[in-house]
Image (cartoon, rainbow, N blue to C red):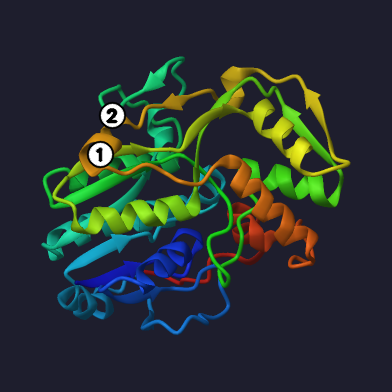
Amino acid sequence: MNILICGGAGYVGGALTDALVNTDHTMRIFDALLFEPEYLKPVDFVRGDIRDHEALQPHLDWADAVVWLCALVADGACDLYSELAVELNQTSVQWLARHFDGRIVFPSTCLVYALQNKELTEEDHTAPNSLYVQTKLEAEKILQNHNALIFRLSTLFGLGDTFSRPRLDLVTNLLTARAVIDGTMTVFGGTQYRPLLHVRDVADAMVCALEADATGVYNIASENRTILDIAETIARLVPGSRMVVQEADVKTTGDYRVSCAKVRRDLGFAPTRSVEDGIKEMRDFISGGRLKDINHPRYNNAAYLKAYGHGLGES
Protein backbone atom coordinates (compact mmCIF):
# COMPACT_ATOMS: atom_id res chain seq x y z
CA MET A 1 0.00 0.00 0.00
CA ASN A 2 1.27 3.51 -0.82
CA ILE A 3 0.99 5.70 2.27
CA LEU A 4 1.20 9.50 2.08
CA ILE A 5 1.93 11.07 5.47
CA CYS A 6 1.07 14.75 5.38
CA GLY A 7 2.87 16.30 8.31
CA GLY A 8 5.20 13.34 8.63
CA ALA A 9 8.17 15.33 9.92
CA GLY A 10 6.52 16.23 13.21
CA TYR A 11 6.19 14.68 16.66
CA VAL A 12 3.63 12.03 15.72
CA GLY A 13 4.91 11.77 12.15
CA GLY A 14 8.39 10.85 13.29
CA ALA A 15 7.04 7.96 15.33
CA LEU A 16 4.78 6.86 12.50
CA THR A 17 7.54 6.73 9.89
CA ASP A 18 9.59 4.54 12.24
CA ALA A 19 6.61 2.25 12.75
CA LEU A 20 6.08 1.90 8.98
CA VAL A 21 9.71 1.22 8.06
CA ASN A 22 9.49 -2.48 8.82
CA THR A 23 6.15 -3.04 7.07
CA ASP A 24 5.40 -3.87 3.44
CA HIS A 25 3.95 -0.39 2.89
CA THR A 26 5.66 2.28 0.77
CA MET A 27 5.56 5.71 2.38
CA ARG A 28 6.13 9.28 1.31
CA ILE A 29 6.33 12.35 3.55
CA PHE A 30 4.76 15.68 2.54
CA ASP A 31 5.65 18.38 5.04
CA ALA A 32 6.30 22.13 5.18
CA LEU A 33 8.94 21.76 7.93
CA LEU A 34 7.23 24.33 10.11
CA PHE A 35 9.16 23.33 13.24
CA GLU A 36 12.10 21.45 11.71
CA PRO A 37 15.04 23.08 9.84
CA GLU A 38 15.64 20.00 7.68
CA TYR A 39 14.49 16.43 7.08
CA LEU A 40 17.18 13.85 7.78
CA LYS A 41 15.48 10.47 7.52
CA PRO A 42 16.24 8.25 4.51
CA VAL A 43 12.57 8.32 3.52
CA ASP A 44 10.89 9.65 0.36
CA PHE A 45 10.27 13.30 1.25
CA VAL A 46 8.56 16.24 -0.45
CA ARG A 47 8.65 19.69 1.10
CA GLY A 48 5.34 21.39 0.52
CA ASP A 49 2.37 23.26 1.95
CA ILE A 50 -0.93 21.33 2.02
CA ARG A 51 -2.68 24.53 0.92
CA ASP A 52 -0.78 24.29 -2.38
CA HIS A 53 -3.28 21.98 -4.01
CA GLU A 54 -1.50 21.80 -7.33
CA ALA A 55 1.64 20.52 -5.63
CA LEU A 56 -0.22 18.11 -3.35
CA GLN A 57 -2.60 16.48 -5.85
CA PRO A 58 0.00 14.27 -7.66
CA HIS A 59 0.98 12.72 -4.34
CA LEU A 60 -2.64 12.05 -3.46
CA ASP A 61 -3.04 10.40 -6.86
CA TRP A 62 -0.09 8.15 -5.98
CA ALA A 63 -1.41 7.22 -2.54
CA ASP A 64 -3.76 4.43 -1.48
CA ALA A 65 -4.05 5.92 1.99
CA VAL A 66 -3.32 9.26 3.64
CA VAL A 67 -2.43 9.94 7.25
CA TRP A 68 -3.35 13.60 7.68
CA LEU A 69 -1.16 14.93 10.49
CA CYS A 70 -0.86 18.51 9.19
CA ALA A 71 -2.37 20.89 11.73
CA LEU A 72 -1.74 23.83 13.98
CA VAL A 73 -1.82 21.98 17.28
CA ALA A 74 -3.01 23.19 20.70
CA ASP A 75 -4.90 26.23 21.89
CA GLY A 76 -1.96 28.61 22.20
CA ALA A 77 -0.74 28.06 18.64
CA CYS A 78 -4.22 28.41 17.18
CA ASP A 79 -4.95 31.57 19.15
CA LEU A 80 -1.79 33.18 17.73
CA TYR A 81 -2.76 32.48 14.11
CA SER A 82 -6.50 31.94 14.03
CA GLU A 83 -6.93 32.23 10.25
CA LEU A 84 -4.06 29.82 9.60
CA ALA A 85 -5.52 27.42 12.16
CA VAL A 86 -8.81 27.27 10.27
CA GLU A 87 -7.00 26.83 6.94
CA LEU A 88 -4.77 23.99 8.13
CA ASN A 89 -7.06 22.22 10.58
CA GLN A 90 -10.40 22.52 8.84
CA THR A 91 -10.45 23.96 5.30
CA SER A 92 -7.64 21.68 4.13
CA VAL A 93 -9.54 18.64 5.38
CA GLN A 94 -12.58 19.75 3.42
CA TRP A 95 -10.45 19.94 0.28
CA LEU A 96 -8.93 16.52 1.02
CA ALA A 97 -12.36 14.92 1.36
CA ARG A 98 -13.34 16.28 -2.07
CA HIS A 99 -10.15 15.24 -3.87
CA PHE A 100 -9.15 11.90 -2.35
CA ASP A 101 -11.27 8.74 -2.25
CA GLY A 102 -8.81 6.38 -0.54
CA ARG A 103 -8.32 5.52 3.11
CA ILE A 104 -7.87 8.48 5.49
CA VAL A 105 -6.47 8.28 9.01
CA PHE A 106 -7.01 11.50 10.94
CA PRO A 107 -6.03 12.62 14.45
CA SER A 108 -8.55 14.62 16.43
CA THR A 109 -8.50 15.28 20.16
CA CYS A 110 -10.27 14.09 23.29
CA LEU A 111 -10.60 17.77 24.21
CA VAL A 112 -13.77 17.82 22.10
CA TYR A 113 -15.60 16.52 25.19
CA ALA A 114 -14.56 19.50 27.34
CA LEU A 115 -15.02 19.00 31.09
CA GLN A 116 -17.33 16.20 32.17
CA ASN A 117 -16.99 14.39 35.45
CA LYS A 118 -17.19 10.84 34.13
CA GLU A 119 -15.39 8.40 31.84
CA LEU A 120 -16.35 9.54 28.37
CA THR A 121 -17.22 7.37 25.38
CA GLU A 122 -17.51 8.28 21.72
CA GLU A 123 -21.28 8.62 22.23
CA ASP A 124 -21.00 11.43 24.77
CA HIS A 125 -21.81 14.95 23.69
CA THR A 126 -19.07 17.29 22.56
CA ALA A 127 -18.53 20.84 23.78
CA PRO A 128 -15.65 22.54 22.00
CA ASN A 129 -14.36 25.47 24.03
CA SER A 130 -11.45 26.75 21.93
CA LEU A 131 -10.61 27.45 18.31
CA TYR A 132 -8.27 24.45 18.17
CA VAL A 133 -10.96 22.07 19.38
CA GLN A 134 -13.62 23.66 17.14
CA THR A 135 -11.51 23.11 14.03
CA LYS A 136 -10.82 19.51 14.95
CA LEU A 137 -14.49 18.79 15.56
CA GLU A 138 -15.46 20.42 12.26
CA ALA A 139 -12.87 18.26 10.50
CA GLU A 140 -14.42 15.17 12.10
CA LYS A 141 -17.80 16.16 10.69
CA ILE A 142 -16.31 16.68 7.21
CA LEU A 143 -14.87 13.15 7.22
CA GLN A 144 -17.83 11.35 8.77
CA ASN A 145 -19.21 9.99 5.46
CA HIS A 146 -15.82 9.02 4.02
CA ASN A 147 -13.50 6.03 4.33
CA ALA A 148 -11.91 7.67 7.34
CA LEU A 149 -10.87 6.51 10.77
CA ILE A 150 -10.58 9.32 13.30
CA PHE A 151 -8.59 8.95 16.50
CA ARG A 152 -9.47 11.28 19.36
CA LEU A 153 -6.03 11.49 20.89
CA SER A 154 -5.31 11.83 24.58
CA THR A 155 -2.57 14.02 26.03
CA LEU A 156 0.60 12.63 24.48
CA PHE A 157 3.94 11.96 26.14
CA GLY A 158 7.28 10.32 25.42
CA LEU A 159 9.88 10.54 22.66
CA GLY A 160 8.66 10.23 19.08
CA ASP A 161 11.89 9.26 17.34
CA THR A 162 15.57 10.11 16.99
CA PHE A 163 15.21 13.04 14.58
CA SER A 164 12.06 15.00 15.44
CA ARG A 165 12.08 17.58 18.23
CA PRO A 166 10.70 16.41 21.56
CA ARG A 167 7.68 18.39 22.70
CA LEU A 168 7.93 19.95 26.14
CA ASP A 169 4.50 21.60 26.04
CA LEU A 170 2.93 18.29 27.09
CA VAL A 171 2.36 17.79 30.81
CA THR A 172 4.27 14.54 31.43
CA ASN A 173 7.24 15.58 29.29
CA LEU A 174 7.36 19.07 30.79
CA LEU A 175 7.19 17.93 34.40
CA THR A 176 9.88 15.32 33.74
CA ALA A 177 12.14 17.93 32.16
CA ARG A 178 11.65 20.27 35.13
CA ALA A 179 12.41 17.47 37.57
CA VAL A 180 15.65 16.56 35.80
CA ILE A 181 16.94 20.11 35.15
CA ASP A 182 15.53 22.13 38.06
CA GLY A 183 14.87 19.41 40.61
CA THR A 184 11.41 20.91 41.20
CA MET A 185 8.04 20.50 39.51
CA THR A 186 5.19 22.94 40.04
CA VAL A 187 1.74 21.35 39.94
CA PHE A 188 -1.36 23.54 39.69
CA GLY A 189 -4.21 21.82 41.48
CA GLY A 190 -3.26 18.27 40.65
CA THR A 191 -6.54 16.48 41.26
CA GLN A 192 -7.62 16.96 37.64
CA TYR A 193 -7.55 13.84 35.46
CA ARG A 194 -5.98 13.52 32.03
CA PRO A 195 -6.21 10.65 29.55
CA LEU A 196 -2.64 9.87 28.52
CA LEU A 197 -1.01 8.16 25.53
CA HIS A 198 2.55 7.51 24.41
CA VAL A 199 3.33 9.06 21.02
CA ARG A 200 4.64 5.76 19.66
CA ASP A 201 1.39 4.04 20.65
CA VAL A 202 -0.37 6.61 18.44
CA ALA A 203 1.88 5.50 15.59
CA ASP A 204 1.12 1.82 16.17
CA ALA A 205 -2.60 2.55 16.24
CA MET A 206 -2.37 4.41 12.94
CA VAL A 207 -0.54 1.53 11.28
CA CYS A 208 -3.32 -0.75 12.51
CA ALA A 209 -5.95 1.66 11.18
CA LEU A 210 -4.53 1.72 7.66
CA GLU A 211 -5.67 -1.81 6.90
CA ALA A 212 -8.71 -1.97 9.16
CA ASP A 213 -12.25 -1.81 7.79
CA ALA A 214 -13.52 0.35 10.64
CA THR A 215 -14.50 3.97 10.10
CA GLY A 216 -15.70 6.69 12.40
CA VAL A 217 -14.46 8.11 15.70
CA TYR A 218 -12.36 6.28 18.29
CA ASN A 219 -10.99 7.42 21.63
CA ILE A 220 -7.45 6.27 22.25
CA ALA A 221 -5.57 6.37 25.57
CA SER A 222 -3.38 4.13 27.67
CA GLU A 223 -4.66 5.28 31.05
CA ASN A 224 -6.39 8.07 32.94
CA ARG A 225 -4.30 9.69 35.69
CA THR A 226 -4.35 12.81 37.82
CA ILE A 227 -1.63 15.41 37.35
CA LEU A 228 -0.64 14.83 40.99
CA ASP A 229 -0.18 11.12 40.30
CA ILE A 230 2.01 11.90 37.28
CA ALA A 231 4.18 14.25 39.37
CA GLU A 232 4.48 11.73 42.21
CA THR A 233 5.58 9.08 39.74
CA ILE A 234 8.18 11.44 38.27
CA ALA A 235 9.48 12.28 41.76
CA ARG A 236 9.93 8.56 42.39
CA LEU A 237 11.74 7.98 39.08
CA VAL A 238 13.92 11.11 39.16
CA PRO A 239 15.92 10.89 42.40
CA GLY A 240 16.35 14.17 44.23
CA SER A 241 13.39 15.88 42.59
CA ARG A 242 10.35 17.22 44.40
CA MET A 243 7.02 18.78 43.55
CA VAL A 244 5.40 21.99 44.71
CA VAL A 245 1.60 22.05 44.63
CA GLN A 246 -0.25 25.32 44.10
CA GLU A 247 -3.99 25.67 44.47
CA ALA A 248 -6.00 25.89 41.25
CA ASP A 249 -9.63 25.67 40.27
CA VAL A 250 -10.34 22.42 38.42
CA LYS A 251 -12.89 24.34 36.35
CA THR A 252 -10.02 26.26 34.77
CA THR A 253 -7.40 23.50 34.69
CA GLY A 254 -9.73 20.89 33.21
CA ASP A 255 -10.75 17.40 34.27
CA TYR A 256 -11.73 14.58 31.93
CA ARG A 257 -11.29 10.83 31.44
CA VAL A 258 -12.03 8.65 28.43
CA SER A 259 -13.01 5.06 27.75
CA CYS A 260 -11.18 3.14 25.03
CA ALA A 261 -13.37 0.06 24.96
CA LYS A 262 -14.46 0.75 21.38
CA VAL A 263 -10.96 0.79 19.86
CA ARG A 264 -10.08 -2.42 21.69
CA ARG A 265 -13.27 -4.08 20.48
CA ASP A 266 -13.27 -2.94 16.84
CA LEU A 267 -9.55 -2.73 16.06
CA GLY A 268 -8.16 -5.08 18.67
CA PHE A 269 -5.73 -2.33 19.63
CA ALA A 270 -4.35 -1.68 23.10
CA PRO A 271 -1.40 0.61 23.94
CA THR A 272 1.72 -1.11 25.25
CA ARG A 273 3.70 1.79 26.76
CA SER A 274 3.06 3.17 30.24
CA VAL A 275 3.48 6.62 31.69
CA GLU A 276 6.45 5.22 33.61
CA ASP A 277 8.04 4.19 30.30
CA GLY A 278 7.68 7.70 28.95
CA ILE A 279 9.06 9.31 32.09
CA LYS A 280 12.13 7.07 32.08
CA GLU A 281 12.96 7.74 28.43
CA MET A 282 12.55 11.51 28.84
CA ARG A 283 14.61 11.40 32.04
CA ASP A 284 17.44 9.52 30.36
CA PHE A 285 17.26 11.66 27.20
CA ILE A 286 17.55 14.95 29.10
CA SER A 287 20.00 13.81 31.78
CA GLY A 288 22.20 12.43 29.00
CA GLY A 289 22.73 15.97 27.72
CA ARG A 290 20.69 15.59 24.55
CA LEU A 291 18.95 18.96 25.05
CA LYS A 292 20.93 22.15 25.54
CA ASP A 293 18.05 24.27 26.79
CA ILE A 294 14.65 22.90 27.78
CA ASN A 295 13.28 26.47 27.78
CA HIS A 296 14.06 27.06 24.11
CA PRO A 297 10.89 27.96 22.17
CA ARG A 298 11.55 25.14 19.69
CA TYR A 299 10.12 22.58 22.09
CA ASN A 300 6.83 24.40 22.60
CA ASN A 301 4.45 24.92 19.67
CA ALA A 302 2.98 28.24 20.78
CA ALA A 303 6.28 29.65 22.06
CA TYR A 304 8.03 28.80 18.80
CA LEU A 305 5.36 30.44 16.66
CA LYS A 306 5.33 33.51 18.88
CA ALA A 307 9.11 33.83 18.63
CA TYR A 308 9.64 32.99 14.97
CA GLY A 309 6.28 33.13 13.21
CA HIS A 310 4.98 30.38 10.95
CA GLY A 311 6.87 31.30 7.80
CA LEU A 312 4.33 29.63 5.51
CA GLY A 313 3.26 32.70 3.58
CA GLU A 314 -0.18 33.11 2.09
CA SER A 315 -2.28 30.22 0.85
Compared to 63, does 238 lie above or below? above
Compared to 72, does 52 lie above or below? below
Check disc 1 and report the residue beneath it.
Answer: 217
Residue 187's disc number: none
The location of residue 155, given as percent across then percent down, is 51, 41
Assess whether mark 2 and mark 1 are in contact (beta carbons under 8 angstroms). Answer: yes
The location of residue 314, given as percent across then percent down, is 41, 70
Check disc 2 and report the residue beneath it.
Answer: 122
For the residue pair 147 and 72, the one nearer the viewer reads as 147
Q: Is residue 220 visible?
A: yes
Left or right: residue 98 compared with residue 130 = left
Q: Secondary structure at mark 2?
A: loop
The location of residue 229, given as percent across then percent down, is 66, 27
Left or right: residue 306 compared with residue 151 = right
**Mark 1, residues whose alpha carbon is within 10 Å: few (<14), some, or many (≥20)?**
many
Which quadrant, please, contains the C terminus? Answer: bottom left
